[in-house]
Image (cartoon, rainbow, N blue to C red):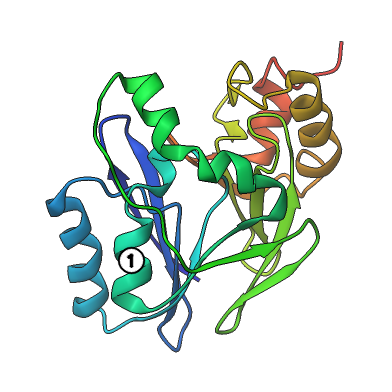
C-alpha cells in the first residue's frame, strides 16, 4: 500500500489517498474545502495515473466530508460510510454552521453506500477491515489493513488522545471501551493514521494514552 497524506481546510483535517501496485486507489475522509485543495487531490491522481475506485469515510463530520461531493461527481464513485452514521452525515452542513459560526453552504454527495462493522472493503488488492468504535460519533469507524499493518482511525484515536465526545451522538465510555477492546488489541507495530495530527502506533498508545490505560 502506498499512502499520501493531505492536510485540508480550516481545522487541519487529514485526508489519505491510498493505492495498490496496480494503481487502484481510494480516498479516505476527503475534507478538501478550498479549490486549491481539491486541485491538489486531482492533480496528484493524474500525475501518478491512479484509478480512484472508492471514497471512504471514517465518519460524517463536516470537516471530513467537505470535498466528498466534488470527488463523488468527478470520479463517479459514491461516498461510503457506516450505516450507523447516516444522521451525523445528513447534519454535516448544520454542524459546520454551529461549530465554525460560518454561513457557508456545501453539497453532500447524492450517491451513497453504507457498510457495517466487520465488513471487508477492497481497493484493488488492498483489504480494509471496518472496525466500528462509536463514541466520537454514533457510527465512527477505523479502517484496518492487516497485511500492511496500518489503521486509519479518523477522529476516534489520535496520538496520546481520543476523539472528543461532547458533540451530538457522542459517548465517551463507548469510545473508550471499544478502542480498548477492538483497537488497542491490534499488533503493537501497527501504524495509526488519525484524522488530525501526526501518526502514532498501537504500542505507543498502549503505553502513553492516558485515556485508554486501565487504572
Q: How many marks?
A: 1
| Residue 26 image offset from top left, x and y in percent | 46, 70
Q: Is residue 60 left or right of residue 71?
A: right
* Picture quadrant where residue 150 is located: bottom right
Which residue has dot 1 on it? 71
Secondary element at image label 1: helix
- Left or right of 80? Residue 67 is left
Pick out the residue farthest to the top: 215
Residue drawn at (27%, 40%) of the image: 105
Residue 13 percent location from the top left of the image: 37, 39
For the point 25% across and 31% down, the residue is: 10
Q: Write the residue at 39% across / 20% down.
A: 99
Q: The C terminus lies in which quarter of the figure? A: top right
Residue 184, how many percent across, how many down?
A: 77, 38
Nearer to the camera, 78 or 202: 78
**For this rendering, which residue is in front, 193 or 170?**
170
Q: Where is residue 30, by image quadrant?
A: bottom left
Look at the picture and state if 29 lies above or below 97: below
Visible in this render: residue 197?
A: no
Identify which residue, 188 or 163, lies in the foreground: 163
Q: Residue at x 32, y 54 (%)?
A: 67
| Identity of the residue furthest to the bottom in this view | 22
Q: Is residue 174 visible?
A: yes
The vertical placement of 128 against 198, above or below, is below
The answer to whether 121 is drawn above or below residue 206 in the figure is: below
Q: For the residue carrying disc 1, how many other residues have a C-alpha within 10 Å: few (<14), some (14-19), or many (20+)?
A: many
Where in the figure is residue 181, as x and y percent of width and height? 86, 37
In which image quadrant can residue 116 be found?
Answer: bottom right
**In-image side of 83 versus 151 (left or right):** right
Amino acid at each position: 500500500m502506498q499512502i499520501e497524506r493531505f492536510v485540508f481546510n480550516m481545522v487541519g483535517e487529514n485526508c489519505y489517498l491510498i493505492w495498490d501496485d496496480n494503481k487502484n486507489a481510494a480516498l479516505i475522509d476527503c475534507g478538501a474545502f478550498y479549490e486549491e485543495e481539491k486541485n491538489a487531490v486531482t492533480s496528484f491522481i493524474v500525475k501518478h495515473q491512479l484509478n480512484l475506485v472508492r471514497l471512504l469515510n471514517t465518519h460524517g463530520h463536516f470537516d471530513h466530508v467537505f470535498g466528498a461531493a466534488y470527488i463523488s461527481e468527478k470520479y463517479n464513485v459514491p461516498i461510503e460510510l457506516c450505516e450507523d452514521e447516516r444522521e451525523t452525515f445528513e447534519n454535516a452542513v448544520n454542524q459546520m454552521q454551529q461549530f465554525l459560526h460560518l454561513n457557508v453552504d456545501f453539497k453532500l454527495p447524492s450517491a451513497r453506500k453504507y457498510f457495517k462493522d466487520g465488513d471487508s472493503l477492497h481497493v484493488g488488492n488492498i483489504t480494509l477491515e471496518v472496525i466500528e468504535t462509536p463514541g466520537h460519533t454514533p457510527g465512527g469507524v477505523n479502517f484496518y489493513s492487516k497485511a500492511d499493518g496500518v489503521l486509519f482511525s479518523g477522529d476516534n484515536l489520535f496520538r496520546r488522545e481520543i476523539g472528543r465526545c461532547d458533540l451530538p451522538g457522542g459517548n465517551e465510555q463507548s469510545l473508550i471501551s471499544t478502542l480498548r477492546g477492538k483497537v488497542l488489541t491490534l499488533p503493537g507495530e501497527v501504524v495509526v493514521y488519525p484524522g488530525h495530527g501526526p501518526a502514532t502506533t498501537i504500542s505507543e498508545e498502549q503505553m502513553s494514552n492516558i485515556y485508554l490505560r486501565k487504572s
